[in-house]
Amino acid sequence: GDEGAGHTRLRTKSVLTPNASRHMLTTLMAGRAAEIMVFGSPSSGAASDLAAATSLIRDMLFRWGMGPRLEAVGPAMTSEEHGHVEHELRTALRRAQVLLQARRQQLDCIAENLLQRRFLCASEVDELMH
């Protein structure tokens, strides 16, 4: 089951720019980045965030025209299109890793609070980040 799995819930605007979408993508990849940083490898814990990130990048690149092609692409993707998705996911993962490395103390503090309480709202996370 997913009892122990973390989940990132994002508020989205009705209209997303490429920049805002990439910020969301980085946020979604941060759980996986944290697992790699803390445990040395990813786990199934960030699976729902990875699925959401994959869906977001597919929409950006092939539905909203924010990728290498302007046209909307159907659900079947070519290997080249899969390559674009993989590249964007890995780029977002690297961005998340750099951000988390720079804020490792705050990451550890948030993790400790989550272990104790199992849930933090956005304002609590903001407070722990400062």
Image (cartoon, rainbow, N blue to C red):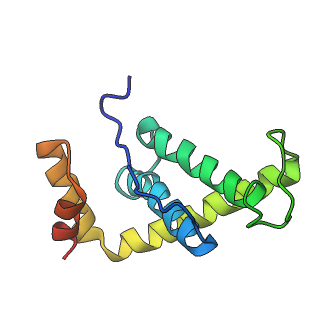
Residue in the foreground of this view, choosing between 41 and 74: 74
Compared to residue 126, the image places residue 77 above or below, namely above
Q: Is residue 82 left or right of residue 129?
A: right
Residue in the foreground of this view, choosing between 106 and 75: 75
Q: Which residue is drawn at 58% across and 74% down?
A: 19
Compared to residue 27, the image places residue 74 above or below, namely above
Q: In this view, does 101 lie to the left or right of 55?
A: left
Residue 32 rendering spot, x and y as whole percentages: 46, 51
Q: Is residue 109 left or right of residue 86?
A: left
Q: In this view, does 42 lie to the left or right of 122?
A: right
Compared to residue 99, the image places residue 115 above or below, namely above
Q: Residue at x 46, y 67 (%)?
A: 97
Quadrant assignment for the C terminus: bottom left
The outermost residue toward the left is 116
Quadrant assignment for the N terminus: top left
Q: Residue at x 46, y 36 (%)?
A: 44
Residue 50 rendering spot, x and y as whole percentages: 53, 46
Residue 14 rendering spot, x and y as whole percentages: 52, 60
